[in-house]
Amino acid sequence: MRIAVVGTGYVGLVVGACLAETGNDVVCADVDAGKIARLNAGEIPIYEPGLEPLVERNLRDGRISFTTDVGPAVASAEIIFIAVGTPPGEDGSADLKHVLAVADTIGSNMPDDGPEKIVITKSTVPVGTAAKVRAAVARHTGRTVHVCSNPEFLKEGAAVLDFMKPDRVVVGVDSEYAREKLGELYAPFVRTGNPILFMDIASAEITKYAANAMLATRISFMNMIAGLCEAVGADVTHVRQGIGTDERIGPGFLFAGIGYGGSCFPKDVKALIHTLRDTGVDASILDGVEQVNDAQKSVLVQRVTERFGADLTGRTFGVWGLSFKPETDDMREAPSLTVVRGLVERGARVRAHDPEAGHEAERYFEDLITSGGLTLCEHNYDCLEGADALLVLTEWAPYRNPDFARVRAQLGEPVIFDGRNLWDPERMREAGFHYVSIGRQA
Ligand code: UGA
């Protein structure tokens, strides 16, 4: 099938590469000329395991191409994915200007004949957006256009695998034609028997937000329980196992930590709250989810000040991990933004390491780097040089089994604040550390 994907962010790029991999003819379009030039040279602007070889192979074999000419790309495609950003507006609602601009371009580049077109919203868009897309296209053309909502559930760091082997594919359709075409398009991805769930468009649109909001709710719920465990001397790890083995609850997404970050959960929870309020539905559950998450991002700074005092002048802290989770260089809404700034604002110096997010950190923390508050280190042990304590903010694999003797020798005091519960508190005590983690006893 001839496919156009508009928007080469995380989602667009993965969708384009994976659909090319299954033999489709894919053109990815983006107005960012710099990005397109890099992609045409086989260079991937983001760190995502497995994506680069996939793009390289499909570029070489001519199944994928990259262009800044959005008009011709959508004019020649039978299936068009809209995968542009939906940044939060001032009030938290999703801003649809990029999505509707693409719909406009599709309408104004509609050929007079040729196969019927299917326009798919892949971006995370609030319920009712497909109808707006349809209206924007119809302003320019009388031709039938099938509009679908096909939300994406891929996780950063596992995006290629998630797309190639999805738990399910959700498609909101309004015609038998679209249903058949998308059934064919996705057939190679569900050969193991996982379902393609066809439904009405509004339900598909809501499914995406409901999934992310449910997952965010589980995390905030566990962070709340972690607070209780700390207060009464219990251990959140045991509680997680105790409830996660209940089939109705399941084990996933129950890890307490320093709050969820990334480009999706914070934005989508906000947008869903907005939609709920707009439609007169009580949003208090999600208000609570947000509140807990905001507070959780500051928990480690609080623990640090409990140990070292509110004024951290003259103190230095080593930080392991800056990305919002492992296997990504993404720092959007990362808890590290709150923690590192919180420490520096209280007078401390921070020496931080991340296996992949160094260049992003330079951007996010430009002011702190210039002022000398933050130094980015090449190696994770370099962070510990002259540091009073170590903070672990992201559970990158290389941090999981460190040389504790070396850590202890380098630290001014053997103190570790672990925001990701990487190690066993008992063993850390035996190893001579004052070890503070989340929802467990120090
Ligand atoms: C999330 C969803 O998991 C995807 O299904 C969805 O497609 C995507 O958003 C999206 O809407 O595009 P992602 O943001 O890549 O994916 O990251 P997650 O792996 O879901 O992690 C989100 C945050 O939750 C991270 O900060 C992580 O550290 C935190 N988390 C996750 C916890 O604190 N505890 C957990 O048990 C799990």
Image (cartoon, grey):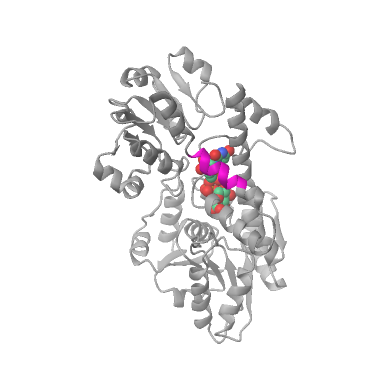
Quarter occupied by residue 31:
bottom left
- Left or right: residue 308 compared with residue 249: left
Report if residue 269 is visible in the image.
yes
Question: Is 280 located above or below residue 251 in the figure?
Answer: below
Range of magenta residues: 288-297
- Per the image, is 296 magenta? yes
The answer to whether residue 397 is left or right of residue 441 is: left
Q: Is residue 427 above or below residue 210?
A: above
Q: Is residue 92 above or below residue 140?
A: above
Query: What percent of the width, then of the height, locates residue 280?
Result: 69, 62
State the image coordinates of residue 113 (x, y, percent, origin top left): 57, 85
At horizontal 38% and vertical 60% (from top left) the residue drawn is 39
Residue 167 visible, this orientation: no
Quarter containing the N terminus: bottom right
Placement of 409 over or under 367, stated as above or below? above
- Depth order, front residue of 99/90: 90
Residue 38 location in percent, x, y?
34, 60
Q: How many marks?
A: 0
Q: Main secondary structure of the magenta part?
A: helix
Q: Nearer the viewer, residue 356 or 87?
A: 87
Front-lying residue, 271 or 64: 271
Given residues 317 and 39, the one toward you in this image is: 317
Where is residue 105 shown, x and y percent of the image?
49, 77
Residue 141 in the figure: left or right of residue 429: right
Q: Residue at the front extreme?
A: 310
In magenta stretch: residue 111: no
- Ligand 1 quadrant assignment: top right
